[in-house]
Amino acid sequence: MIAIYARQSINKMDSISIETQIEECEKQLRKGEKASVYFDKGYSGKNTDRPEFQRLLEDIRLGSVSRVICYKLDRVSRSVLDFTMMMETFSRYKVDFISCNEKFDTSTPMGRAMLSICIVFAQLERETIQQRVIDAYCSRSRKGYYMGGRCPYGFGVEEYVIDGIKTSHYVVIPEEAEVLKLMYSMYAQPQVSVGDVIKHLIKLGIKNSRDEKGCWDKARVGELMKNPIYVKANIDVYDFFKSQKTMIHNIPEDFIGTNGCYLYSEKEAKRKTVSLEGHHLVVAPHEGIIDADIWLKVRKKCLGNKQVAKPIKARNTWLAGKIKCGKCGYALNVRKSNTKVGRYLVCSRHGQTINGCEGVGGLHAKDIEDIIFDCMVEKLKEFSALSASTNVVENPKINELRIAIAKLQDEIDGWVVKIPEASPTVMKLINENVEKLDAEKQELEKKLRDITAAQSSSGCNVDEITDYMSKWDELEVPDKMAVVDVLISVIRATQDTLEIEWKI
């Protein structure tokens, strides 16, 4: 039996139809010969997982096919590996293969040689098309175009035009936006977990409008806490992503504190939960929902989660989430003993067989807490006031200066990358420009410090915090943690040292 095989992936005006392919193949039949037709419509040639093609192979194995005719080589396969395996099958069962377009016949040595060459170019064509699609996607995404996919919670989609090109953008759904604000404000607290957020939503009777059953999924909520589409991106967001070595496709002036952002990933980039290095950030055309300070607090918390103790409720120490091992940087966990020591701190990685830490020994939790408490009391004596972003209206000049400083730093970086290939003459030019830009930057930084210092003097009175310190023993653990979070960024402890990184 002679078999004709045809394939068409999608219907297009300029594509060869199944009917046309069959007609061309029938011209290869000798007088009086008839052929059975196998065709797959709507299937790609990237693999052989096609129903009619598999039926053809099965008939070949049964010995009922002696010759296969197709219109063009890539109608059968675009993969060198798949085609090689197919030709081995044809050879084993003594089946000849004829391609109308390439004009060769595997019953001859020249035909078999030409076949191998043509299939290589067929795969090259497929990979070239694939790369063009990837490049087009990257180019459009970095210009802020809507790239489809599931619409995130808090947004709907409407048509939009960017540079005369029709696309779409997100629009805020007010009811869902309020839920997001609640979730972010809760999770921004150091002692609150994603599970706590979900429990609170259930308690309030707030259902997930994107789920048929109205349920909240822990993984989905975790994703919401990391996504920059929600942030009202200002210069703080720009600085944050730049410090994370993210590729930013907008100038600092675009971060005006109103729009959200798109974060795209390269194949080789690490997961966003672990690192933002190598990812791409674009200011999006839609409005953000979450204020930058809250979003950054949550995002930094998410990035640091690998160094936070397992989510056991902080009932045993108010240092939970703040105190780290001074040797490996991971959290110190609280353990209890029946001895006089009572509670003690150990490294969470101590004892691990892979990438373990030698640990810092058993630090007496009560002694460490007393030391930290005394340090906080002493630190507060240095200040007459603390800045409170919630009570103080930010001076717009601060944002202008920070944008200008970021621009100058970008210019400096642009000159610095040219150093490895610079000639002595160019090197002199680089030094002159970098010195000039750095001088301007230092002058702006001084102005920024002066304005910031003047504004901080109008902050909340330190007596408010000191009052908490005077009633320390009466406070619950979560309240103590809230105070510590205002004053301290991180505590690093070993058996012999104790280092506090202050926020004030």
Image (cartoon, rainbow, N blue to C red):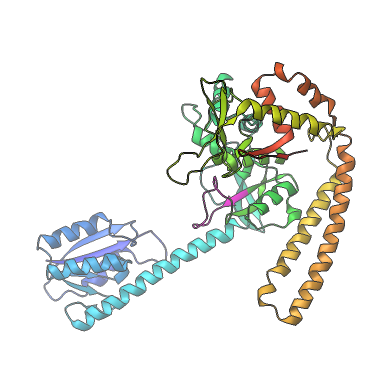
Q: Is residue 271 magenta?
A: yes
Give left or right: position of 240 versus 451: left
Nearest to the observer: residue 395 or residue 159: 395
Residue 289 visible somewhere in the drawing: no
Residue drawn where x is 24% and y is 71% of the image:
25
Residue 142's spot in the image, x, y percent?
A: 61, 57
Extreme residue in the bottom direction? 110
Residue 270's spot in the image, x, y percent?
A: 52, 52
Please state the extent of the stretch shown in magenta in the rendering: 262-275
Q: Quadrant of the C terminus?
A: top right
Residue 424 visible somewhere in the drawing: yes
- Tell me: residue 54, above or below residue 343: below
Q: Quadrant of the N terminus?
A: bottom left
Residue 80's spot in the image, x, y percent?
A: 30, 69
Give left or right: position of 72 versus 203: left
Q: Is residue 139 magenta?
A: no
- Tell me: residue 235, above or below residue 173: below
Q: Quadrant of residue 157?
A: top right
Nearest to the observer: residue 77 or residue 204: 204
Nearest to the observer: residue 193 or residue 218: 193
What secondary structure predominates along the stretch shown in magenta?
A: loop
